[in-house]
Image (cartoon, coloured by chain):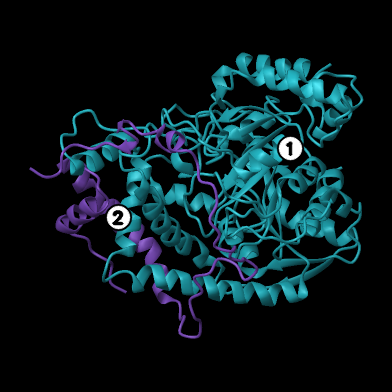
Chain colours: A cyan, B purple
Amino acid sequence: MKFEELSLLEIVDLLHSQKLSSVELTQYFIDRINDRKELNAVLEIYDDAIEQAKHADERIKNGFRGKLAGVPILIKDNILFKGKKASCASKFLENYVAQYNSTVVDKMLAEGAVILGRTNMDEFAMGSSTENSAYGNTLNAIDPMRVPGGSSGGSACAVRAGLCPVALGTDTGGSIRQPASYNGVVGIKPTYGRVSRYGVVAYASSIEQVGLFTKTVKDNAYMLSILSGGSQNDETSLKVEVPDYLAQIKGNIKGIKVGVLKEVSDAVKGLDVEKTYFDLIEFLKENGAEIVYTNMPHFALTLPCYYIIAPAEASSNLGRFDGIKYSRRSVTASNVDEIYVKSRSEGFGKEVKRRIMLGNFVLSSGYFDAYYNKAKKLQQKLKKEAEEVFKSCDVIILPTTTGEAFEIGSKTQDPIAMYKEDLFTILANILGVPALSVPCGKGSHGLPFGMQVLADCLKEGQVYNVADYIQRQYGR
Amino acid sequence: MSKTKISIEEVRRLASLSALDFTEEELNSFIPEFEKILEFVDQVKNCDTDDVEIEYTSHKLATLREDEAKESSPQEEILMNSPKTKKGSFCVPKMLD
């Protein structure tokens, strides 16, 4: 049987009914990862994966029916799993071993999951192509000449290439949805605070979220109900009830109000995604949705707003990497100041240094009001505009990317071109609302791209319902 | 609006604030790169934001937990990732003569 072709729900069913053992399944995916080493999607297969699977099989035999009992899952390299390396694809954390479990890992283990290994990413999640990894770039799962997107490129590639049924990522400005788009898989960034960030290495704390990749929207809904829920250790996580998202998929979109933003309709003109975007809106209308034409006048400023807030928070968050507490210390440092400077200079890659410098610039005296405070105010303004939009819309539709995956190396010399990759994804991070990318069309080279469904905070159920309809019905 | 200019002294000061060391060549390459990025983010300056207050709290639904004393991680776990420790402490070169 080709397990990589099964959905997560089908796999859970096989494991629960004991028609398939976790050991067999886990070994199958380990073999696939080893067979596709050229993708460089997976940085490490944990040495106890088979042990974990044996344990899961034992529990299943004894009647345990956890929602992920025996399911092998890959996690992004910035998510902590006790006793395992978590390097954030950085040389700085090359030998860092997690001292505790992240909340998401605990939640998956409680449901019986096998944590299979860790996936490649842009260093400290800074990038849109997984070319910024200190351990080499990851390839697009469909076209090896192209990038998988980023920063969670390893996870997206792994799901598409059938190296696991589900993989976790993080999304600060599009780091789940953009690679989902480029690899033709489903990826969600949940509401800010929906999933606890405890045990996830911080980049831009006020806008980032843990999320996940699957092949189907239904798998994604099933999985998010497991990962969601507040934790005492993350003050920003929301201690509100977690719905059964799968049960919120109704199978129809009758009467659902779909918002179309004027600024987005203008921005897509001439892009590879233009036709699909307008076709999709037409399709939703024909199938019973009510299209609401609305606007967010400051939409275009989301991108510069992000590139102020994110580096500012990054420069603060990365201050902890001082060469004393974690992992790397320069061997040539002879005093404390040199430990800081040399360890950081040797350990961080180019993009990380660039963002730390930029962050310290916008936070430095004389510029703080002009940049950081201004961006925070703008964020507030955008939130108010969104409040108005969500008064008349259940969901908003946006493209995920401007087109299909770009070629490796084509944007590495131009940071602004790379930053513009996030044109359509950043809105959801700035607003803190849930956004999902569902595969929707193909670009001029025949490669996939996705469309996003956004909804107001904590309305993931609405997002899944519409996205599931699109995945099953659009283009058929 | 005039472009934000950045000087080599400013780049040096930022590098020092960032605890990062660069070669002269790298420092110089930051100037055009930064000016380009700043030109891009300078767009926010055109937006009128007098009507909004900054909210530094992340989410209106977020809550603080009670400040209760709890068991901490064991000392050896906290120290295990440090490149150098001694008698239960982080170890750095001598600071005072």
Q: Is residue A169 left or right of residue A246?
A: left
* Front residue of this view, candidates A363 and A68: A68
Q: Is residue B57 left or right of residue A335?
A: right
Residue A113 placement (x, y as % from top left): 73, 31
Q: CA distance from mark 1 to mark 2?
A: 47 Å
**Residue depicted at x 80% and y 25%:** A5
Task: Mark yes or no: residue A295 visible.
Answer: no
Check the picture and name the quadrant holding the N terminus of chain A: top right
Residues beneath discs 1 and 2 located on the same chain: no
Tag 2's secondary structure? helix
Density class for disc 1 (Cα within 10 Å; few <14, some 14-19, many ≥20) is some
Nearer to us of marks 1 and 2 is: 1
Q: Amino acid at mark 2?
A: Phe
Residue A209 placement (x, y as % from top left): 59, 52
Task: Using the image, determine if residue A337 lies above or below residue A97.
Answer: below
Residue A397 placement (x, y as % from top left): 71, 59
Check the picture and name the quadrant holding the C terminus of chain A: top right
**Residue depicted at x 61% and y 77%:** A384
Label 2 resides on the chain identified as B
Which residue is denoted by mark 2 in the rendering?
Answer: B34
Residue A79 placement (x, y as % from top left): 56, 39
**Residue depicted at x 67% and y 42%:** A212
* Front residue of this view, candidates A230 and A5: A230
